[in-house]
């Protein structure tokens, strides 16, 4: 790092960016290797050593006490006190310090505001002020834009520029290519815990993207053209909130026909999760209807929806898909344990469960030591196959698979994909949600792109990736040219530029593919 | 990632805001007291004497008139809230309403008491309230110290008991109240040390650990009481006591003077501690760090605050305070008996919650509980028909309502009870 430099650290989720920076900030201790500051090795016992060495960090999850005021948060750990041993806080001085720093770097914050009342963007500003009052020379920003709105991101980039002008160095961790190109002086790309290359911001997006995720492997799925039948799932005007009561699905209309795969593409967090959960009866529907084969099912319990002929592969298998401590055989009947032949009256029928489990294990190629092994001991791919086996063992009208191959090895991906297509071919309607564009393109007969809780476009699977990518960034074809030019140039129309950071996100290609082997 | 620019849906409370609901409850109480207490009260004068006896200056009011007057005041306060006054009036009007209700009730009770007993000595009431509240004050302060740093302190009962025991034992052996006092502090701190080590170092569930420590304290002190103290009570269980220290000038204030400022060390110490801890918690570096550790330990850690050290220190301090609170029994009032705290530690825990984890709040809550207790005693003395158990129930009822969020928002420190694991 040089003084007054903005150094971007680019990498996929889980590539090791945050871990590296936590080591640099003294929160984690290195197993090997050393850190050099001005040529001298630095040993950090804790964050206070890092602060003393002039390193400050803005964490991805803010390190602010929500019930404290801005000034209290800023002074914590470095309090100015009066009155000797009693240690009375010098609030006036803290307030003045906050005011000074915010003025010098143009970071407007009210020192007496309580953190929990402030919007996320301002909270982040407080974090930066906190670091600056400690006289840091090097500021680490860990995924600072992940939680910001485009406007807030724009403001943050401006702040970073003014810090740079004041001679501070910044490490900027992100996986968004657009932001990197807009602000970085130098780029280091990390993949799977290793530096895989450095680049200058003039490098093209494709170069950066391929460095970041490795050579892209296009997953091809053998399939015949779909023979779409009658509509099975019809979603109309659906409105759903997320856990924080923020609108997540904002008027979605979708139809899935028998015998076709509808793929839902989109950057994560654009309402896909909530859409699926609402269909499954896991999340209240605020407005709109969900119709399954002519029958309105919103308001039904999840059990009733499942019994009506819906198969569901949840996006997080360890939380929602399996009971890890239960055996493979038990997990295979979680949906129908209370029905014959697996349950009769109050009792389970262990023999029926065991024999059906053996059958299913063979049929779905689950690699497990035995049907009685706890499912948590299996590899990710085999766990996923257990879920798929369970869900496909009922007669289905609709099969919903959310992130069906996340964290799954290549062999299992192929197997799961072929089962999805086979299900389609027997006439089931299939809805696949994936944040991996290749998977969606490979499986789907039609692709719905979600952006900010809306379906922004429905396209065919042979649409160019770039076009889908732009849709995922919220740019519809007619607006596209303006946004393209925004990325390279410094100051085009503000509206287009705001979108530029997001436009970068869809570019990454499936991380699971090649690296898993 | 992409945050939808739809604002958070506003929760529309409609007509029945919290203020209005409280108003409705007060109005109902006011009507009940006006009608019921007014009807039951007699035409006798209800006398509230400003001394410890029947004689001397007194505030007097006709029983029926008083019961009705104060009932109407309560109803009026309730009606004002119901009519939708600004929210900042809530606390004031709520206070006026509840005091009115209590006074209306007292007018009925005092005026209906038999001849010769139909007066209420205010000095005794105030003094009794404070004496009964004292262990609660110490206990709740111990809770504040502990829980503000993020360690749940269910072991207050045990800390009080151990303090009372070691105060009595070492006070007796040495013949010095001061040695007894120090021993009591160490006794309380000993229970705290166990809590700290198991909760902070070994991550044992803090509530479970607290309960276990209470049982341990009952067991150990009970055993030593039977096997040691009872063998030679003269030697082991006859601690000297702190005498009454009259504070000049202040003791001349009517009612409050004789009630509060002719008292022993513990009352002065308790009130002083409330003040000191309140200032320290909100105005000093120690307080800021304590609260940070109790709210968001990771944030404190990233700023170089030693989370575990802060917690150890605070838990031990809590033990010292509670230990001294236990000694307020054995070094001022009674000799030690088995399980003599008798659940006061748990009421202190309730006072802590009712007082919203603040020292002054805890003081007010403790006084409220102490008053309920004292009122029960008084009603028994004047031969009232109201069972004292009914009043003894009040503290718990009030705490339940408080915890359920009916009396303002009660929020524990965010990291209370959560062990901190680095990394």
Image (cartoon, helix red, strand yellow):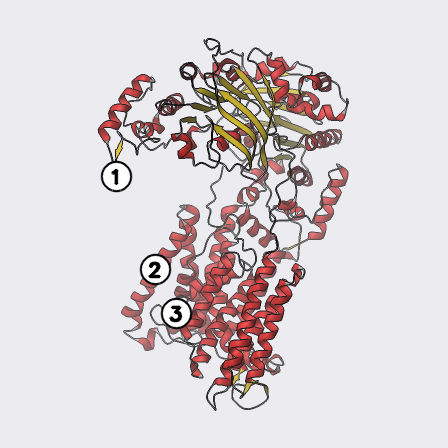
Which disc is residue A108 wearing?
none
Q: Which x, y percent locates residue B153?
A: 45, 56
Pointer 3 indicates a residue of which chain? B
Pointer 1 indicates a residue of which chain? A
Determine the secondary structure under disc 1: loop
> Looking at the rendering, in which quadrant would you find the N terminus of chain A?
top right
> Looking at the rendering, in which quadrant would you find the C terminus of chain A?
top left
Label 3 or label 1, whichever lies nearer to me, is: 1
**Location of mark 2 (residue):** B215
**Of residues B313 and A436, which is closer to you in this image?**
A436
**Location of mark 1 (residue):** A346
**Location of mark 3 (residue):** B170
**Of residues A3 and B91, which is closer to you in this image?**
B91
Question: Rounded to the nearest whole Å, what is the CA distance between mark 3 and mark 1?
Answer: 63 Å
Specify the quadrant of the image occupied by residue A309: top left
Q: Is residue A270 visible?
A: no
Badge 3 crowding class, 10 Å Cα cut-off, few under 14, some 14 to 19, many 20 or more, is: many
Q: Which x, y percent locates residue A8?
A: 64, 23
Badge 2 crowding class, 10 Å Cα cut-off, few under 14, some 14 to 19, many 20 or more, is: some
Q: Is residue B228 above or below residue A447?
A: below
Question: Rounded to the nearest whole Å, what is the CA distance between mark 2 and mark 3?
Answer: 22 Å
Specify the quadrant of the image occupied by residue A492: top right
Question: Rounded to the nearest whole Å, what is the CA distance between mark 2 and mark 1?
Answer: 41 Å
Q: Earlier in the sequence, mark 2 or mark 3?
A: 3
Lateral position of residue A289 relative to residue A421, left or right: right
Are the residues under marks 3 and 1 on the same chain? no
Q: Is residue B4 visible?
A: yes
- The residue at the far left in this view is A351
């Amino acid at each position: 790092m040089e003084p007054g430099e903005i150094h971007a650290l680019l990498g996929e989720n889980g590539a090791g960016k945050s871990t590296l920076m936590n080591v640099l900030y003294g929160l984690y201790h290195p197993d090997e290797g050393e850190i050099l500051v001005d040529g001298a090795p630095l040993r950090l016992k804790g964050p206070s050593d890092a602060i003393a060495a002039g390193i400050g960090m803005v964490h991805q999850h803010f390190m602010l006490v929500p019930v404290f005021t801005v000034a209290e948060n800023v002074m914590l750990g470095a309090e100015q006190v009066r009155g000797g041993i009693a240690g009375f806080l010098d609030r006036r001085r803290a307030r003045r310090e906050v005011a000074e720093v915010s003025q010098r770097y143009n970071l407007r914050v009210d020192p007496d505001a309580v953190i929990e009342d402030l919007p996320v963007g301002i909270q982040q500003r407080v974090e930066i002020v906190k670091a600056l009052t400690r006289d840091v020379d090097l500021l680490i920003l860990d995924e600072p834009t992940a939680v910001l709105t485009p406007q807030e991101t724009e403001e943050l980039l401006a702040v970073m520029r003014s810090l740079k002008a004041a001679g501070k160095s910044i490490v900027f961790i992100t996986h968004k290519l657009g932001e990197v190109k807009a602000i970085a002086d130098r780029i280091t790309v990390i993949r799977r815990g290793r530096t895989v290359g450095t680049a200058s911001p003039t490098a093209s997006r494709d170069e950066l993207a391929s460095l970041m995720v490795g050579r892209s492997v296009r997953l091809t799925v053998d399939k015949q053209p779909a023979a779409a039948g009658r509509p099975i799932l019809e979603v109309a005007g659906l409105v759903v909130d997320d856990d924080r009561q923020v609108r997540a699905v904002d008027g979605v209309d979708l139809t899935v026909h028998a015998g076709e795969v509808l793929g839902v593409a989109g950057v994560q967090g654009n309402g896909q999760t909530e859409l699926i959960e609402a269909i499954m009866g896991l999340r209240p529907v605020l407005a709109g209807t969900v119709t399954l084969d002519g029958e309105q099912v919103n308001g039904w319990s999840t059990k009733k929806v499942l019994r009506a002929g819906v198969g569901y592969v949840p996006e997080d298998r360890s939380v929602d898909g399996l009971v890890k401590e239960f055996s493979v055989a038990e997990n295979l009947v979680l949906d129908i344990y209370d029905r014959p032949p697996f349950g009769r009256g109050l009792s389970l029928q262990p023999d029926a469960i065991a024999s059906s489990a053996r059958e299913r294990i063979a049929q779905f190629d689950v690699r497990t030591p035995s049907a009685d092994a706890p499912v948590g001991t299996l590899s990710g791919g085999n766990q996923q196959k257990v879920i798929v086996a369970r869900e496909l063992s009922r007669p289905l009208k609709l099969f919903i698979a959310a992130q069906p191959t996340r964290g799954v090895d290549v062999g299992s991906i192929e197997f799961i994909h072929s089962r999805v297509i086979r299900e389609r071919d027997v006439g089931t309607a299939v809805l696949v949600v994936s944040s991996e564009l290749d998977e969606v393109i490979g499986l789907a007969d039609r692709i719905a792109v979600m952006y900010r809780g809306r379906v922004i476009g429905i396209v065919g699977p042979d649409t160019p990736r770039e076009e889908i990518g732009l849709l995922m960034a919220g740019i519809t074809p007619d607006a596209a040219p303006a946004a393209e030019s925004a990325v390279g140039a410094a100051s085009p129309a503000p509206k287009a530029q705001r979108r530029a950071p997001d436009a970068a996100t869809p570019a990454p290609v499936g991380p699971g593919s090649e690296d898993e082997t | 990632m992409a945050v939808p620019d739809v604002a958070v849906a506003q929760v529309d409370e409609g007509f029945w805001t919290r203020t209005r609901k409280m108003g409705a409850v007060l109005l109902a109480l006011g009507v009940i007291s006006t009608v019921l207490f007014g009807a039951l009260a007699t035409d006798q004068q209800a006398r509230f004497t400003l001394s410890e006896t029947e004689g001397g200056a007194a505030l007097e009011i006709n029983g029926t008139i008083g019961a009705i007057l104060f009932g109407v005041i309560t109803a009026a306060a309730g009606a004002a809230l119901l009519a939708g006054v600004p929210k900042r009036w809530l606390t004031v009007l709520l206070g006026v309403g509840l005091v009115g209700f209590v006074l209306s009730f007292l007018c009925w009770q005092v005026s209906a008491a038999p001849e010769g007993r139909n007066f209420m000595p205010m000095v005794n009431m105030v003094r009794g309230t404070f004496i009964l509240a004292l262990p609660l004050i110490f206990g709740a302060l111990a809770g504040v110290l502990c829980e503000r740093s993020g360690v749940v302190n269910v072991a207050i009962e045990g800390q009080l008991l151990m303090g009372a025991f070691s105060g009595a034992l070492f006070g007796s052996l040495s013949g010095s109240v001061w040695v007894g006092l120090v021993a009591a502090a160490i006794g309380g701190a000993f229970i705290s040390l166990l809590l700290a080590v198991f909760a902070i170092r070994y991550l044992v569930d803090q509530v479970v650990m607290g309960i276990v420590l209470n049982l341990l304290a009952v067991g150990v002190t009970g055993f030593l009481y039977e096997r040691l103290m009872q063998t030679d009570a003269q030697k082991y269980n006859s601690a000297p006591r702190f005498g009454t220290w009259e504070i000049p000038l202040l003791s001349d204030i009517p009612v409050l003077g004789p009630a509060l400022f002719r008292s022993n060390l513990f009352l002065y110490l308790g009130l002083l501690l409330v003040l000191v801890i309140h200032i320290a918690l909100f105005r000093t570096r120690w307080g800021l760090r304590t609260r940070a550790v109790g709210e968001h330990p990771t944030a404190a850690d990233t700023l170089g605050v030693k989370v575990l050290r802060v917690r150890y220190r605070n838990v031990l301090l809590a033990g010292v305070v509670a230990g001294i609170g236990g000694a307020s029994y054995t070094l001022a009032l009674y000799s030690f008996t088995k399980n003599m705290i008798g659940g006061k530690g748990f009421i202190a825990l309730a006072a802590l919650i009712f007082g919203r984890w603040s020292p002054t709040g805890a003081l007010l809550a403790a006084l409220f509980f102490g008053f309920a207790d004292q009122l029960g005693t008084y009603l028994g003395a004047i031969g009232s028909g109201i069972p004292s158990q009914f009043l003894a129930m009040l503290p718990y009822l009030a705490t339940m309502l408080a915890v359920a969020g009916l009396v303002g928002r009660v929020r524990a420190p965010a990291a209370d009870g959560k062990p901190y694991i680095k990394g």
